[in-house]
Image (cartoon, helix red, strand yellow):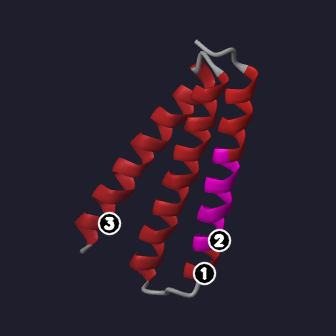
Amino acid sequence: MTWVFIVTVGLLSVAGLLVLVRLILGRTTLDRIVAVDVFVTVIIAGTCAGMGWVQDGSNIALLAAFALLAFIGSVSAARLVEKKEPYR
């Protein structure tokens, strides 16, 4: 079980670094919005992995609420960007 946790945390760390690079070097606003959404998803996945490691599921409702807020924020921001850009 230990090596599974180490591999999971390692892959999530690499994904987080790549998303941060995309967030910094993103060309458009929509790229940055998607990067923030993916970064929130990586944080939620890391928290879930940590909860599995310590075998404590007391924060599941908090993580579900955080994921819902992140989704609503991403959809709202994407709609605002869509309204600003001219149609093709």
Q: Secondary structure at mark 1?
A: helix
Spatial CA span between label 2 and label 3: 24 Å
Q: Secondary structure at mark 3?
A: helix
Give the number of marks.
3
Dot 2 or dot 3: first in sequence order is 3
Label 2 vs label 3, nearer the camera: 2
- Horizontal and vertical percent for residue 60? 55, 80
Magenta span covers which residues?
63-75
Question: Which one is in front, 81 or 29?
Answer: 81
Q: In the image, what residue type sits under mark 1?
A: Ala
Q: Do residues under tags 2 and 1 come within 8 Å of each other at their CB atoms? A: yes
What residue do we see at 47% from left, 77% from top? 51
The crowding category of the residue bearing disc 1, from other C-alpha atoms within 10 Å (few below 14, some 14 to 19, many at least 20), is: few
Q: Is residue 65 left or right of residue 12?
A: right
What residue do we see at 47% from left, 61% from top? 46
Question: Which one is in front, 70 or 39?
Answer: 70
Mark identifier at residue 61: 1
Question: Which one is in front, 59 or 80?
Answer: 80
- Horizontal and vertical percent for residue 55? 42, 86
Q: In the image, what residue type sits under mark 2?
A: Ala
- Horizontal and vertical percent for residue 80? 74, 34
- 44, above or below 22, in the image: below
Spatial CA span between label 3 and label 1: 22 Å
Q: Is residue 67 magenta?
A: yes
Residue of label 3: 5
Q: In the image, what residue type sits under mark 3?
A: Phe
Mark identifier at residue 65: 2
Spatial CA span between label 2 and label 1: 6 Å
| Residue found at the very far front of the displayed protein | 87
